Image (tube, coloured by chain):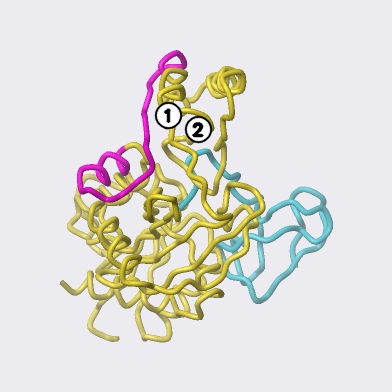
Amino acid sequence: MSDGFRLGVFYTIIRPEEKWILAAAEARGLTVERLSDADSTFGLDPPADRPSVVLNRSVSHTRAVYAAWCYDHYGIPTVNAAAVVELAGDKVRTSLRLAERGVPTPRTVVALSEEAALKAIEEIGYPAVLKPSVGSWGRLLAKVDNAEQAVQILEHKSALGSPVHSVFYVQEFVPKPGRDLRALVVGDEVIGAMYRSSTEWRTNAARGGTVESAPVTESLRDLAMRAADAVGGGVLAVDLMESPRGLLVHEVNPTPEFKALTSATGVDVAAKIVDYAVTVGRR
Amino acid sequence: MTQCPECDAAVENPTMIPGEVFPCPDCGTELEVTGKNPFTVELAPQEAEDWGE
């Protein structure tokens, strides 16, 4: 492509996903600008030489959000949009939005102090799940089976000191069948879905769960698209659980990893994402 | 060819591109490729609390 179109790829580290994105861009003849999140600077005036669109692949939620707002300020479109990254990267705000839009989601109670968190856990009932409001890969999640554990876990969380850990996001423990579901939304399409299974209750692929392709049924497609639309749309991994009361959306991830989904489904996810970013950049 | 900043082992991986992370074959420390020609590495960034998807 020689029309001056440039794809910026904003990244923290180059994982297989970013390598595949770079390869897909190269295969399409795109000019790519690699933008390291650790090296980038952002002034108040738009840079003279700027990419046509920026694909935000930073694994740091903080960096991803601030960079996206800076690009937004410069008039450079990003995938995903700044507001989407900000909202979907925060579990509390995502839950609120899903509830507002009537998307089925686990019962959730938020508390802002250790004392209130204990009340929130009692309100949810045992077992409950405590999650950090920001961050993923199943880190620092805790399943709380009784009041004694609740007191101990809350004490440990408070000892971590960070303000993030003083926001207590408490969710019902959903008795799922040893697996959950992930559907990947790119624009107005669910490009694939997979089951993530594990012998432990956390099924994140990053925690060593196994994956297999899942059929994109009408109900899965509908729910995944509603969840993605609820947070503003774009490239989003929608995580769902099969509960006794039907599918529940428990997370919408704005900077999805897709190595596992690519291997499970055979879908060229990187190519779909690059094509979508080009579409956004040319709007 | 360069040295692991942690254990001084010789490391080189011509197929990797800057930004990629790999474990030192000797000590296992995570290294980040910072240059291709010549091949250079630094200690990889540590996973932070807000890292994720």
Q: Is residue A87 left or right of residue A198?
A: left
Q: Is residue A32 above or below residue A44?
A: below
Q: Identify the residue at the far front of this view.
A: A244
Q: Chain B shown in which color?
A: cyan
Chain where mark 2 sits: A
The circle on residue A128 is: 2
Give the residue drawn at x 48%, y 44%.
A174
Chain A hue?
yellow
Residue on which disc 1 sits: A124
Disc 2 from disc 1: Cα separation:
6 Å
Name the residue type under label 2: Ala
Marks 1 and 2: in contact by CB < 8 Å? yes
- Magenta-drawn segment: A93-116
Please tell me in which quadrant of the rendered image residue A152 appears. Answer: top right
- Magenta span contains residue A99: yes
Question: Quadrant of the image for the C terminus of chain A?
Answer: bottom left
Task: Give the residue at x 50% y 69%.
Answer: A261
Looking at the rendering, which quadrant does residue A170 occupy?
top left
* Few, some or many residues within 10 Å of mark 2 (<14, 14–19, 20+): many
Q: Secondary structure at mark 1?
A: helix
Q: Which amino acid type corresponds to the residue marked 1 in the rendered image?
A: Ile
Q: Residue at x 30, y 39 (%)?
A: A93
Depicted A196 relative to depicted B50: above or below: below
> Is residue A44 on the magenta stretch?
no
Residue drawn 25% across and 44% down? A97
Q: Chain of mark 1?
A: A
Q: Position of residue A250 (x, y in %)?
A: 40, 48
